[in-house]
Amino acid sequence: MIGRRSLALAVVLTLPGLALTAAGAAAQALPRQSPINVTLTSVRADLPMEPLGVHYGPSDVELGYVGKDGDCDSRDAEETEQATVVPGSAYVTLANVRYDLVQFHFHTPAEHRFAGFAAPMEMHLVHRDAGGNLLVIGVPLLVGGLSTVDKVLRTLAPECGEAVDVGWVDLAALLPLDRSSMRYDGSLTTAPFTEGVRWVLMRERWVSAATVARFQDMFADGNARSAQPLNGRRVSINW
């Protein structure tokens, strides 16, 4: 049974939104924005859903800082720590389309909410198909124990400095063993907020309290976009 600290639908707790940039304000006019707050009324059981094939292998991983404002002494709300992998080392398939893992990065607090509940962090694994279409897997990160994510975030890359060589990582271990998911159509969560992104929301992974504290110390004001209106969208679930 899934407890409150997992992806179970919890009590509604609206988190304060980030101040809108000009690009962010323009994005409000778009109808299919991300992230979202998944509510009971938005969920639709689709059985069976199109299976998601996960083909993740080992890869050398490099962790770098993604800057936005050019200021080494401040943290823009869209900045993050981003990991890159060896091309071709990991991909997923959906409806006979292959999406290769390009990078994965992190947000605090989690951008996606479940009945208002946000995990301390969220990992986004960004995939691209041959035509440039994006599929992003979102994984909530909860405090509860060590995992492969802790290895990736053991040493954070400085904003103005060299990337960190994490070493070889079993990329499959980044994802939960249970590959059931929620899916919806959305957008990028940073400018230019491009729509047409296929989102796959998976169950939680555990990380240590030290990892969360280290990341939140760097991003003290958070680096998560606020939840966007559903505008009639439904979230398909195969839980």
Image (spheres, rainbow, N blue to C red):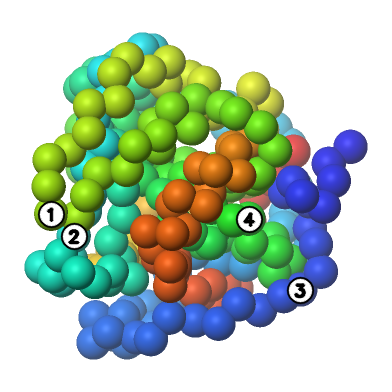
Can you tell which of label 3 and label 4 is closer to the viewer?
Answer: 4
Q: Which mark is residue 12?
A: 3
The residue type indicated by label 1 comes to: Cys
Identify which residue, 35 or 45, lies in the foreground.
35
The quarter of the picture where the C terminus appears is top right
Q: CA distance from mark 4 to mark 2?
A: 24 Å
The residue type indicated by label 3 comes to: Val
Residue 150 on image: x %, y %: 49, 32
Identify which residue, 26 or 196, lies in the foreground.
26
Helix, strand or loop under label 4: loop
The residue type indicated by label 2 comes to: Gly
Q: Which mark is residue 150?
A: none
Density class for disc 3 (Cα within 10 Å; few <14, some 14-19, many ≥20) is some
Q: Earlier in the sequence, mark 3 or mark 1?
A: 3
Find out whether the residues at labels 2 and 1 contact each other: C-beta distance under 8 Å: yes
Left or right: residue 7 compared with residue 35: right
Q: Residue at x 43, y 27 (%)?
A: 151
Q: CA distance from mark 3 to mark 2?
A: 32 Å
The quarter of the picture where the N terminus appears is top right
